[in-house]
Image: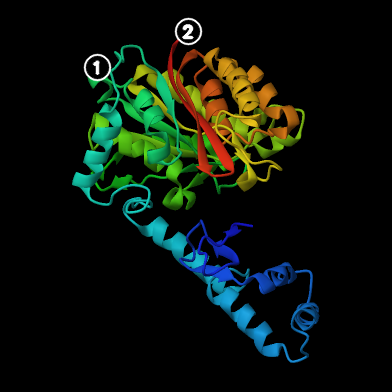
């Protein structure tokens, strides 16, 4: 269930592309169209005989053993079957991350330039293009919310969020609440490692991390491997370093989905371990006050074919106009600091808008109840021709 499946982007190689977003395996496979239906036989419920029967029907040939062997061995070598090779690859990658001295940049050279001069030039352009006046005065700024969409697609919204930071933010500890796309539900991932980028290494406030580890109990996963591959925090670190300096101090926290709360008629903190961690964050906020700067890495609605909807989505048009109205209702509750009202809207239809930022937002609203937000920018962007992601920039100040 951790694999990505999508149509092959190569016109000369049609089929189903498979890759591992957790990067236990660096393989990418394209399964030819005639064999795609065979993948359902690797569900742990059906046998080799069932697969052979399917292959016989597909080929019209009784001699299918070689095809079966080749398909199974290829999937296994790639790490795409739940077998001994997959377990070995997973354990190896997780050991490497746990033992490493820092969290290496996972998306450099792909989502953004791998060289420091090129990266600085790109961020300079993003932060200055179309901007008028200087940064907003930070003053009593509690925190901000920014996207984690691709930098090129959402740069104007990143700019709106990070232009709220002033010189007085340089000495603050940035508590970064990122969406954990692959983490366990109702869990929070911590790491003591500094985040590295082409521009240098951050400084992680290990004293805060260790205190959250003690107070968070089994809600906490320390040295959570998801940090190794997750972009929702990495992209915030890029802008924080650019504005506040490469050695900015951080506390990176990955927030898993609130699955039980979404499926039930209760708030997330009805789950005891969620309640415990939200309490630990609330105590941290009460104790540290304005020494902290809260940074949320969030996107909002995910609509269209890519995300399982029966329609093609175009930013600002058709169904996306109604999505904008519903997004605005949720944002209004966030601005008001109304965690309960926000959660009630998310729970409608079990979050059919598929917001990718609900958990960091709700966590923040509960941990920092004095925060009141202001929407600085809202945007919808076609991530492909048939699918749209919405996102926004918010700043938070005291009530």
Q: CA distance from mark 2 to mark 1?
A: 25 Å
Q: Position of residue 213 (x, y in %)?
A: 48, 39
Q: Nearer the viewer, residue 138 or 101?
A: 138
* Label 2 Cα neighbours within 10 Å, binned few <14 / some 14-19 / many ≥20: few
Mark 2 or 1, nearer chain start:
1
Q: State which mark lies toward you, 2 or 1.
A: 1
Residue 389, relative to residue 62: is it above or below? above
Check if mark 2's residue and mark 1's residue have beta carbons within 8 Å. no
In the image: residue 225, left or right of residue 263 = left
| Residue assigned mark 2 | 399
Q: Nearer the viewer, residue 338 or 328?
A: 328
Q: Position of residue 161 (x, y in %)?
A: 38, 25
In the image: residue 195, left or right of residue 189 = left
Quadrant of residue 294 within the rendered picture: top left
Q: Nearer the viewer, residue 213 or 314?
A: 314
In the image: residue 271, left or right of residue 229 = right
Tally of marks: 2
Q: Nearer the viewer, residue 388 or 144?
A: 388
Residue 242, relative to residue 85: is it above or below? above
- Residue at point 64%, 30% (across, down): 318
Quadrant of residue 238 within the rendered picture: top left
Disc 1 element = loop
Q: Residue furthest top?
A: 399
Q: Position of residue 114 (x, y in %)?
A: 27, 52
Residue 290, relative to residue 232: is it above or below? above
- Residue at point 52%, 60% (across, down): 9
Q: Residue furthest left?
A: 117
- Residue 248 visible in the current orientation: no
| Residue assigned mark 1 | 134
């Amino acid at each position: 269930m951790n694999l990505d499946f999508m149509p092959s982007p190569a016109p000369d190689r049609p089929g189903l592309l498979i890759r591992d977003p957790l990067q236990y395996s660096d393989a990418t496979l394209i399964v030819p169209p005639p064999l795609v239906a065979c993948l359902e036989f690797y569900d742990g419920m059906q046998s080799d005989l069932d697969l052979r029967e399917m292959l016989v029907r597909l080929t019209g040939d009784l001699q299918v053993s070689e095809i079966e062997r080749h398909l199974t061995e290829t999937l296994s070598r790639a790490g795409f079957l739940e077998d001994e090779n997959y377990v070995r690859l997973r354990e190896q990658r997780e050991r490497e991350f746990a033992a490493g001295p820092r969290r290496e940049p996972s998306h450099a050279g792909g989502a953004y330039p791998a060289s420091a001069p090129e990266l600085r030039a790109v961020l300079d352009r993003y932060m200055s293009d179309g901007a008028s006046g200087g940064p907003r005065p930070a003053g009593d700024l509690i925190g901000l919310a920014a996207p984690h969409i691709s930098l090129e697609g959402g740069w104007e919204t990143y700019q709106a969020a990070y232009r709220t930071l002033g010189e007085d933010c340089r000495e603050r500890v940035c508590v970064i609440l990122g969406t954990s796309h692959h983490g366990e539900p109702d869990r929070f991932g911590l790491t003591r490692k500094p985040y590295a980028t082409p521009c240098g290494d951050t400084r992680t406030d290990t004293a805060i991390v260790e205190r959250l580890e003690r107070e968070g109990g089994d809600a906490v996963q320390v040295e959570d491997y998801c940090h190794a591959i997750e972009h929702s925090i990495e992209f915030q670190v890029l802008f924080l370093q650019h504005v506040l300096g490469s050695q900015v101090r951080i506390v990176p926290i990955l927030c898993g989905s609130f699955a039980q709360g979404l499926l039930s008629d209760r708030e997330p903190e009805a789950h005891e371990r969620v309640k415990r961690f939200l309490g630990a964050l609330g105590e941290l906020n009460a104790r540290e006050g304005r020494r902290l700067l809260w940074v949320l890495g969030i996107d909002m609605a995910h609509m269209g074919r890519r995300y399982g909807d029966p329609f093609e989505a175009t930013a600002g048009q058709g169904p996306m106009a109604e999505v904008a109205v519903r997004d605005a209702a949720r944002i209004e509750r966030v601005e008001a600091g109304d965690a309960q009202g926000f959660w009630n809207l998310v729970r409608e239809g079990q979050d059919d808008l598929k917001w990718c930022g609900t958990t960091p937002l709700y966590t923040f609203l509960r941990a920092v109840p004095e925060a009141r937000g202001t929407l600085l920018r809202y945007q919808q962007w076609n991530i492909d021709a048939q699918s749209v992601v919405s996102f926004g920039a918010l700043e938070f100040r005291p009530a």
